[in-house]
Amino acid sequence: MNKMKLEFLSRSENEAFARASSAAFAALLDPTVEELTEIKTAVSEAVSNAVIHAYAGLESGVITLEMTVHDDRRLIISVEDSGCGILDIPQAREPLYTTKQDEERSGMGFTVMESFTDRMEVVSAPGKGTRVTMLKQLDGVNEF
Amino acid sequence: MDIKFKAENGILTALLSGELDHHSAAEIRGVVDQSIITFQAKYLIFDFQGVNFMDSAGIGVVMGRYNRMKELGGQVFIIHCSEYVDRILEMAGVYTIVKRSNSQQEALQWIQEKKNVQEVEA
């Protein structure tokens, strides 16, 4: 069992950093290229949501990325913020739903996260921040 | 993210390379929109050959540009996508309105045919 926890400011340039960190940690499990890309994309979406929505562009917010890896190659990823929180979670999770259409957001963030991981859970409330947790079961490693 | 433009006869080709995420989308959007105006483009071809990462922010950029070109009576094309980027665009239904082409040539051919039809109708 391995674990990492990373905290960084809600600046959009940190989205790439979060992706790279998640990939570096996941690499310890020797995932396939596809699995790695899926993990990076899911993390990118979650972190972007925190930057854009949770903190609404405020760059001094703190975002926490946590990853846990179990011996059975189960990967748990969570992205947490102490931003404004989500009022209606099912609505937020609807494909194409967005509150930032004028910023050209596609409303597909949660949909992408759900597609690229096996399970996703969102815990949030107005004024109480948000925690998105994703589970991804990596495939077995080929032994030569 | 790096972006290079090529413009000819109202057709603007934007060659992107790097990572297309929320952070770079903001930059790309402005530069592409400005180029559409500068070159008076009616057709926009996004060449995604060098795009090595994209998340849903990329969907927003493409759709935003599509809305712009639609207003001008034009069209947006995407060429040279990696399988992965393709998957995300497909998932969001982008290809139901934006055209996916296998090559620059194919896109240009489509545009030429469209122009021919318009000339006949005029």
Image: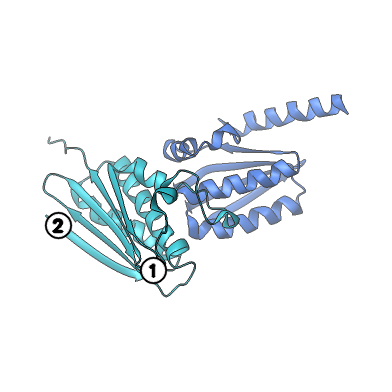
Q: Position of residue B49 (x, y in %)?
A: 51, 42
Q: Chain of mark 2?
A: A
Question: Same chain for the residues at labels 1 and 2, yes or no?
Answer: yes
- Judged left or right of residue B21, residue B61 is right
Task: Examine the rendered structure and indicate whether residue B15 appears above or below residue A78.
Answer: above
Is residue B73 visible in this depiction of the protein?
Answer: yes
Q: Secondary structure at mark 2?
A: strand
Marking on residue A2: 2
Q: Which chain is blue?
A: B
Marking on residue B88: none
In the depicted view, which residue is nearer to us: B78 or A43? A43
- Judged left or right of residue A74, residue B77 is right
Q: Residue at x 29, y 53 (%)?
A: A23
Q: Earlier in the sequence, mark 1 or mark 2?
A: 2
Kind of residue sitting beneath label 1:
Gly
Is residue B13 visible in this depiction of the protein?
Answer: no
| Colouring chosen for the image of the structure | by chain
Q: Residue at x 61, y 55 (%)?
A: B29
Q: Position of residue B102 (x, y in %)?
A: 55, 30
Task: Examine the rendered structure and indicate whether residue A37 appears above or below residue A131.
Answer: above
Q: Quadrant of residue A43?
A: bottom left
Q: Which chain is cyan?
A: A
Q: Position of residue B26 (x, y in %)?
A: 56, 59
Within-10-Å neighbours for mark 2: few <14, some 14–19, many 20+? few
The residue where tag 1 is placed is A127
Label 1–label 2 contact, CB within 8 A: no
Kind of residue sitting beneath label 2:
Asn
